Each structure stands twice: as C-alpha cells, then as structure tokens.
Amino acid sequence: MVGAVALAVSTIAALVVLGRIGPTGLSAAAVQDAVRGAGVWAPALFLVLQVLVTIPPVPRTIFTVTAGMLFGSALGVAVAVVATALGAVVAFWLVRLTGGGVVERFADRPPVVWTRQRLDRSGLLAVTSLRLIPVLPFSLLNYAAGLSGVRFAPYLFGTILGTAPGTIGLVVLGDAVTGRVSPAMLAISVAGGLVGTIGAAVAARRPQLERAAAPE
C-alpha cells in the first residue's frame, strides 16, 4: 500500500513538473537554474525523498532521470549514486535487523529465492552482476540481500559498481532536456550504457555457465 501511494505521488509530481516545461511554460534550463539557486537544500531534499520512496518496491528510474533534469549531469550523477546507495543500505539493514519480518510476504517468491542463492555463493561479484540486470527490480535485490548471508561491504560496493553505468546514462539523458549537455558527458553516458549492457549480458549468462561447469 505504501509503495502504491509513493508511486502515485511521484508520478503526479513528475507530470506537474513536465507540464511546466516546454514552449508554453518554463524552460528546462530555467527550472535547473532555479533549483541550483536553492543551494544545498534541493539536493538534500531530493536525496531524502528518493531514499524514503524507493525502500518500498517503487522503481527508482524516475528519480534518476529527474536528478539530471534538476541538477545537471555532474551533480545529478553524484546525487543519484548517493541516493541509490543509501536507499539500498537502509532497505538492507531494515530487513536484516528485523529478521526479514518487514518483507516476509516476498521471502518465498521464486525470484527472491533465486537471488538469495546467488548472493550466498558469490558476494561482491553476485551483487555487481545482479545490479547490472535492468529487469531485476532494485527493491527485490535489496530485500534478498538482507535475507541472505552476503556481508555488508561487498553488498554496498557491488551496489555502487553495478548501478553506476545505468545511473550515469539516465542522469545525462535527463540533463539533455536542457540542451546544455557537453559532448564529453554524452560520450560518458554512451560508455556507461555500453558497460551496463555488456555487464547485464555477462550476468545473465553466468547461471548457465555455472550449471554447465557443475559436476554431475
């Protein structure tokens, strides 16, 4: 219920913002300038909002794109990466400290069980590779990690490494609305997308390779 409400609020807010950007309203660049004028409070508020909203099973994509629209590529990437890592950390410890009670209804679902098994075996490599798979929900991996035996440090570093390529690409995409993106940032965005795509393909093949290598 909380997740549904949070998603609805986020969607409405995004539609309101987008409705004010364009030929008949504020330009995207003007919105970005206004946000920068708010100082540190704007990124701090954005960070807290993303962490709170993405603890439930709510997609973080809208926040990542919006970070680029509001803060530009450089600051947007920093804010999005930190917010993503904090959201993952809070969800991880919430599950672990409560013994999994807060996500009990998800614990026995096949995707969660499969994810937990991979996390138990591979640690950092598993977290990094799983984060690179776009179709694997962000919150699902947070819950599964909290229920699994993976240690915190590999979980945190794997989350940052695995989400960074996609985060960079989406943030720069959001910033592109302003027309201020430099060719260098576009190149970094494309490189991040390629790394994420290749990593996701490798991650998707790992279970097949592991089964093939397993002794009969």
Image (tube, helix red, strand yellow):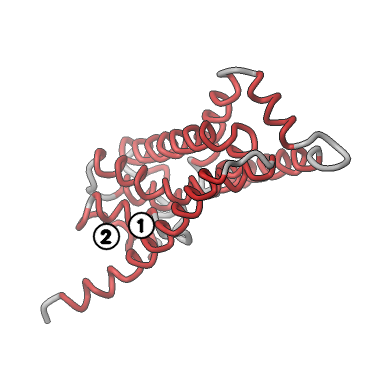
How many numbered marks have been drawn onto this rendered protein structure? 2
Left or right of residue 109: residue 3: right
Give how far across and how far down residue 92 sits, in percent: 36, 40
Mark 1 is on which residue type? Leu
At which x and y percent is residue 58? 55, 47
* Residue that extends furthest to the right in the rendered view of this protein: 24
Q: Report the residue at 24% width, 47% height from top.
A: 150
* Residue depicted at x 33% and y 57%: 129
Figure check: 12 above or below 211: above
Q: Quadrant of residue 49?
A: top right
The image shows residue 140, relative to residue 30, as above or below, that is below
The residue at the point 33 percent across, 66 percent down is 202
Location of residue 47 in the rendering, given as x and y in whole percent from the top left corner = 52, 30
Q: Is residue 78 found left or right of 73 in the rendered image?
A: left
The residue beneath circle 1 is 130
Pointer 1 or 2: first along the chain = 2
Quadrant in which the C terminus appears = bottom left
Mark 2 lies on residue:
118
